[in-house]
Amino acid sequence: MITIYLIIFITLIAAVIVSFAQTLFKSELEKGKMTIPKIIKSLFTNKKILLGIAAYFGSLVIYLYALSKAPLSVVYPIFASSFIFVALFSAKFLKEPLNIKRVIGIALVFAGIALIAVSYA
């Protein structure tokens, strides 16, 4: 039997994967002046964009599995941890600033997600 803790872990994995995909998208889109036609072309030709799309799809499959095993009111907020991972990945890989206001925001999002998770478990 799958426990809620395993579902939380699985959902966190999906959030990390989708955050990785977002980081790939942004890193590739920063390389040049992108127009809508160039973006559409990159959906089929750019290896990192294609990897990001595959990661999105993989994350969706994992998320749907978690959703099939636990309530939406638990799974969706846990998946929102992607906001935390995107901020951290952006700071690490894209060199975006991580100032005190962002750190406080990340801490508040984490606290909210943790409260939701323990309220069900």
Image (cartoon, helix red, strand yellow):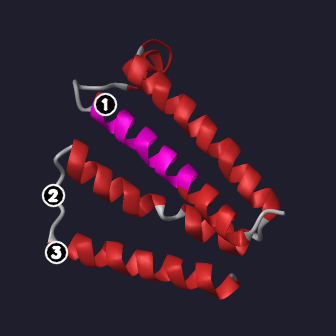
Q: Residue furthest top?
A: 45
Q: CA distance from mark 3 to mark 2?
A: 10 Å
Q: Which residue is mark 1?
A: 29
Mark 3 touches mark 2? (CB < 8 Å): no
Q: Is residue 98 above or below residue 34?
A: below
Q: Residues within 10 Å of mark 1 (few under 14, many from 20)?
A: some
Nearest to N terminus: mark 2 or mark 1: 1
Q: Kindly identify the amino acid type of the residue bearing the numbered disc 3.
A: Ile
Quadrant where the image shows the N terminus: bottom right
Q: Write down the region rendered in magenta.
A: 13-27
Q: Nearer the viewer, residue 59 or 34?
A: 59
Q: Is residue 92 above or below residue 79?
A: above
Residue at image position (22%, 43%) is 94
The residue where tag 2 is placed is 97
Q: Which residue is mark 3?
A: 100
Residue 42: horizontal and vertical position, in percent? Answer: 42, 18
Percent x, y of residue 91: 22, 53
Secondary structure beneath disc 3? helix
Quadrant in which residue 26 is drawn: top left
Mark 3 crowdedness (10 Å alpha carbons): few <14, some 14-19, many ≥20: few
